[in-house]
Image: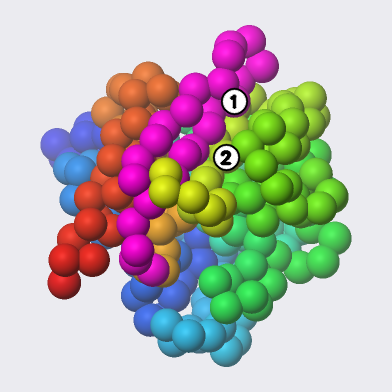
Amino acid sequence: MALRREPHVLVVGGSDSSGGAGIARDIETISSIGVRTCLAVTALTVQTHEAVLEIHPVQPGLVADQMRAALQANKVAAIKIGMLATAEIIVAVAGVLRENLQVLAVLDPVLASTSGRPLLEAGAIAAMKRDLMPLCRLVTPNLIELALLVDTELCVDEDGAVGQGQELLAADTQAILIKGGHASGPRSTDILLRSDQEPIRFDTPRLAASMRGTGCMLASAIAGQLANARSIEDAVRQGKLFVFEKLQRNVAE
């Protein structure tokens, strides 16, 4: 089948019954840039746009089996990883990544919902840092997630964010995109950090818009661009532009 030969992004993440985030947002984003998707569901959630009401993690072995089946069925050029829910699922996903090191993985370290409900069990951050992050081509924390990953206070300025990012790089992470959406000021700046290069900043005007799922969108758009054989820098640039234009349309509506 011709379909099998087209580049796919394997989306690994949780469902969102409201459609505002999670795999629904991932599929929408990746499809809109012309790349096909396949799926491995990590958790079933009951959500509205205001709150996460229930979380039901999938058995880790079933998550891994879904990933292996998707990889066997399709030409998977990139993997986008979102909600993982438990340490056991993190270890299962990392095991499949180890079997497929040629496939670029983008990790959006989803730790809590917009409303504040934890989406990763207590104690699982250590497993994420130890077992999963070193296998991912890019990790995309916002400022809150970054502080939790390095177990410190929320940074107050860009220098502090870069310092925290450098701590993650020192812990065997390949590349980090620090998202500036939770910062203040007239510009929204994301910072790409790699151990062998100077930081690269991606800057857009800060819009007076609030929208769920922007973190899912950005990581998914980057994964879609990587599947289209773009460099990581170009993929980040195109991904940020995608989210900015989506927010612009949201403001206009």
Highlighted magenta segment, given as a residue range:
188-210
Q: Residue at x 28, y 53 (%)?
A: 29
**Position of 99 relative to 144 (above/below):** above
Badges 1 and 2: C-beta atoms under 8 Å apart?
Answer: yes
Which quadrant of the rendered structure holds the N terminus?
top left
Asked if one can make out residue 95 in the rendered structure from this viewpoint, the answer is no
Question: Residue 131 at what x, y percent from top left?
Answer: 75, 40
Q: Residue at x 34, y 24 (%)?
A: 234
**Residue type, label 2:** Ile
Front in this rendered view, residue 176 or 32? 176
Label 2, secondary structure: give it.
strand
Label 1, residues with CA under 10 Å away: few <14, some 14-19, many ≥20 = many
Question: Residue 61 at what x, y percent from top left?
Answer: 65, 58
Residue located beneath label 1 in the image: 193
Left or right, residue 108 beside residue 49 = right
Residue 178, numbered circle: 2
Q: Residue at x 31, y 50 (%)?
A: 243
Question: Residue 88 at what x, y percent from top left?
Answer: 75, 58
User: Dividing the picture into quarters, in which one does residue 175 lie?
Assistant: top right
Front in this rendered view, residue 2 or 238? 238
Left or right, residue 231 beside residue 171 = left
Q: Alpha-carbon distance for marks 1 and 2?
A: 8 Å
Left or right, residue 74 beside residue 147 = left
Question: Residue 200 at what x, y percent from top left?
Answer: 49, 22
**Residue type, label 1:** Leu
Which is the main secondary structure of the residues drawn in magenta? Answer: strand
Label 1, secondary structure: give it.
strand
Q: Residue at x 57, y 78 (%)?
A: 115
User: Dividing the picture into quarters, in which one does residue 96 lie?
Assistant: top right
**Position of 252 relative to 54 (above/below):** above
